[in-house]
Amino acid sequence: MRKTKIVITLGPSTSSLEMIQTLIERGVNVFRLNFSHGDHETHANNISLIRQASKKVGTEVAILQDISGPKVRIGKIDGVLELKKGDTLTLAKEEDDSDPYSLALSYPLIIDMVNVGEEVFFADGTLQTLVIDKDEKALKLQLLNDGELTSRKGVNFPKTKLSISAITPKDENDLAFGATQGIDIVALSFVQDQKDILKAKQIMAKHNFDPFIVSKIETSEAIANLEEILEVSDGVMVARGDLGAEFGVTKLPRIQKHIIAVANAMNKPSITATQMLTSMKDNPFPTRAEVSDIANAVYDGTDAVMLSDETTIGKFPIQSVEVLHDTIKDVEKDYPYYKAFTTIDKSDAVSKSAVELAKNLNKEALVPFTTSGMSAQTLSKYR
């Protein structure tokens, strides 16, 4: 039995009954629906397909609703905007169709929060700029590297404290829809502190909606408030795309290990996401570095790994899942399951002993009898 779970994102490459059935057979445990794209009709159809496929295969799977949150994006660009280091861009509150180098923001008021000398990153940090001038209507940016931009790319402000709510009106509407569909898991985007999760819970309570809540850790504020976020969440996602843009990719391994370690210590599951097998969007085989990345996430103690582009628009979604499954299975043969803790309470002691006993007796599974679910959660800590 594979202990680390596989989450995949449904998209054009995988939105058919036959494909979903095959993915379940290959080991997918959770299907993610990205509410930054698609309408409710499309998502309802996909939910129906997942449930039909699950019933046909005879395997239970979970459905994860990933709500958009206040993701800051640029507006529409005609084609591809090619940019060179030293070029200047304008980030404006209003669109200017006459100037291809003037970009509008999905949250115009953010321009008031940004200061000269701060950095602005686009497309998960692949295009980096510096604010060199500002007025009440726009920011003037200078390119720090060559790159290109297309419509609706994400924008990050790594040095700027943004005062925006983590739950948008669109999110509220999407959560109401999720309640009607009986969604199992909700992922909250761009949470900054405990208040964001509590607000989401209040909204969901109005619809008698009580899903498993996963908070996506994407910002420096979320890292600073990680423990308080975990206290009111059921789990966390290591959202490496925006974290990489916020902190720089060289700091990501340390941050990933920190998030997973804190989640494990608090008995909360973690999902490691973004660019696990990016090369497999176009190639049937992974790179050595990608396989090592998957293995290291498992060694870190992640409870699940997630695919995005690989299964939404990729050419080899089934092969991608197979690589995940095979890599995880091999790593788990060697995984140091018995972690050392300086203190251990009664619940931990019982769970740790049960896992050791199951391992010594060569048992594949443990079934806890629990009323609150806490015993199962504590047990999973020693998986």
Image: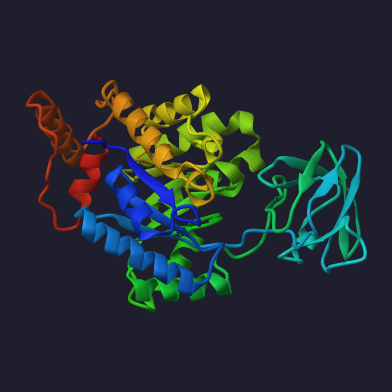
Quick check: 59 left or right of 366? Answer: right
Residue 181 or residue 194, whichever sits in front: 181
Looking at the image, the residue that sits furthest to the bottom is 206
Quick check: 286 left or right of 107? Answer: left
Residue 157 or residue 345, whichever sits in front: 157
Q: Position of residue 245 (x, y in %)?
A: 66, 42
Q: Exactly how many numbered labels are in the figure?
A: 0
Residue 190 or residue 62, whichever sits in front: 62
Indicate the quadrant where residue 31 lies. bottom left
Residue found 35% across the figure and 64% down from its top: 49
- Quadrant where the N terminus lies? top left
Quick check: 180 left or right of 84? Answer: left
Residue found 44% across the figure and 53% down from its top: 14
Looking at the image, the residue that sits furthest to the front is 18
Indicate the quadrant where residue 46 lies. bottom left
- Quadrant where the C terminus lies? top left
Q: Would residue 91 be seen by someone viewing this image from the given angle?
A: yes
Residue 288 or residue 364, whichever sits in front: 288
Q: Position of residue 295 (x, y in %)?
A: 40, 27
Q: Position of residue 107 (x, y in %)?
A: 71, 65
Residue found 43% across the figure and 76% down from its top: 176
The colour scheme used here is: rainbow
Relative to 255, residue 12 above or below: below
Residue found 7% across the figure and 26% down from its top: 361
Looking at the image, the residue that sits furthest to the left is 361
Q: Would residue 29 be seen by someone viewing this image from the given angle?
A: no
